[in-house]
Amino acid sequence: MGLKAPNIIIFLLSIILAVVVIMARVFDAQIPLLTEGGSQFYGLLVAYILLVMGNLARGL
C-alpha cells in the first residue's frame, strides 16, 4: 500500500478542523461538541485520522 497526496477537500477539512479546535483551546471559546470535557482531543484525533485516510485510501 503506497502513500499519495490527499484530495484538496480532505486536506482542507482536516486543517480547518484542527485550527478550530486549537483556537477554541487557546482563546477559551465555547464551541458546542468541541469544548466539553476531553472532546478537544477527539476533535484533533478526527482531523488527523481524516488526513491519514486521505493519504491511504484511493479516491479520498
Image: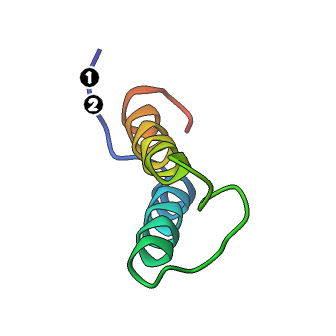
* Residue 10 at x, y percent in the picture: 53, 52
Residue at disc 1, secondary structure? loop
* Residue 32 at x, y percent in the picture: 73, 64
Q: Quadrant of residue 54?
A: top left
Q: Amino acid at mark 2?
A: Leu
Mark number displayed over residue 3: 2
Q: Quadrant of the N terminus?
A: top left
Mark number displayed over residue 38: none
Q: Residue furthest front?
A: 37
Is residue 30 found left or right of 5 in the rendered image?
Answer: right
Query: Which residue: 52% across, 72% down?
Result: 20
Q: Residue furthest left?
A: 2
The residue that mark 1 highlights is 2
Q: Amino acid at mark 1?
A: Gly
Query: Which residue: 27% across, 30% down?
Result: 3
Q: Is residue 58 above or below residue 55?
A: above
* Residue 28 at x, y percent in the picture: 49, 79
Mark 2 residue crowding within 10 angstroms, few (<14) / some (14–19) / many (20+)? few
Viewer-closest of 38 and 8: 38
Picture colour scheme: rainbow
Q: How far is the residue under mark 1 from the one under mark 2?
A: 4 Å
* Residue 29 at x, y percent in the picture: 57, 80
Query: Which residue: 52% across, 50% down?
Result: 43
Residue at disc 2, secondary structure? loop
Q: Is residue 10 above or below residue 26?
A: above
Q: Residue furthest top?
A: 1
Q: Quadrant of the C terminus?
A: top right
Mark 1 residue crowding within 10 angstroms, few (<14) / some (14–19) / many (20+)? few
Q: Quadrant of residue 45?
A: top left
Q: Residue furthest bottom?
A: 27
Q: Are marks 1 and 2 in contact (CB under 8 Å)?
A: yes
Viewer-closest of 35 and 48: 35
